[in-house]
Amino acid sequence: MQNQVSLFIPNSFLAETKDLKLKTSKVGLIGRALAVFEVNQVVVYKDLSIPDEKQTNDGDFIAEVLNYMNTPQYLRKKAIPIKSELRHVGILPPLRAPHHPTSQPKLGDFRQGYTVKRNKKGTFVDIGMDKLAFCKEQLSVNKIFSFKITKFAKEVIVTPDEPDDIYWGYKTVSTNKGLRNSLKLTNPDLVIETTRYADTIDSVFDDLKDKVNSSKHVAIIFGGPYSSINENVESSMWDTISLNTIPNQGTETVRTEEAVFSTLAIFNIM
């Protein structure tokens, strides 16, 4: 599947988990799934089935952990402030994706870099070397951008750029909005609603494959632990398909992280 893919999970994803270490671990499974199946964006939306007085800050926590995982290891200390909520991130599995290089940079490499400071000539950037690289553009400081190394000598010069032929990580968005309004923010042309009460994947596979391959931006949405997707997401702005991606499930319920892996594995072969 070569189109853009956005995955939607509710802020209630962790509602049944109270231990912070377990919460961190569950989010880690989502992060791995995003990278393994080359998802471009993950959107954490507000589960409107939960009353306002019972809403938590889990949505922001989910987004922070996913953002931490997507940030290259050599930038984390500078780019991500220390928070007590992130004290268990050491248990998270590394992504080992192309934007997380383990080798020393060289000419022509693409690297993510953290903008440290700037002057009239440009911006100094940390790309994981002993010295700062320099970009001849004035960029916002204390931000992560993607760069290409265009000169590698006494001075390392980088230019804002990212590869278009390899997976370059995912973007994380926490909207604090319901599912329908969150979908409007991302503007997909095909929305896949996952539910056990829909047609099974094997019965519609060929038609679904044609629709997916003719779409530029596919949104795959998942419900929370207490209920299926409870908002009507049909719209004239996009096509909507309801789909059961785990037919004949052997358990009474399927956890969100299990559904994410199962669903993305299927879409991976389309």
Image: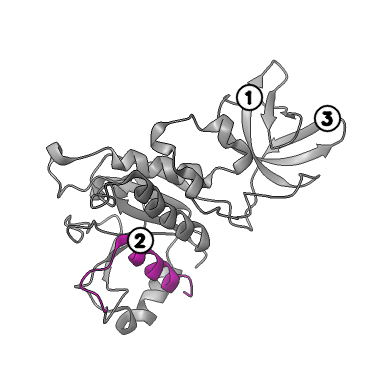
Whether 93 is drawn above or below 112: the answer is below
Determine the secondary structure under disc 3.
loop
**Which circle's residue, 3 or 2, is located before the other in the chain?**
3
The residue labelled by disc 2 is 257
Residue count near mark 3 (Cα–Cα under 10 Å), binned few <14, some 14–19, many ≥20: few
| Amino acid type, residue under disc 1 in the picture | Val
- Residue 180 picture location, percent across and down: 24, 50
Q: Does the magenta portion include 253?
A: yes
The residue labelled by disc 1 is 116
- The quarter holding residue 6 reads bottom left
- Residue 219 picture location, percent across and down: 36, 58
Determine the secondary structure under disc 1.
strand
| Amino acid type, residue under disc 2 in the picture | Glu
Whether 164 is drawn above or below 265: the answer is above
Left or right: residue 136 versus residue 13 is right
**Which circle's residue, 1 or 2, is located before the other in the chain?**
1
**Which of the two marks, 3 or 2, is nearer to us in this view?**
2
- Closer to the camera, 114 or 65? 65
Residue under the point 74% across and 47% down = 109
Q: Which residues are magenta?
A: 250-270
> What separation in Å lies between label 1 and label 2 (alpha carbons)?
36 Å
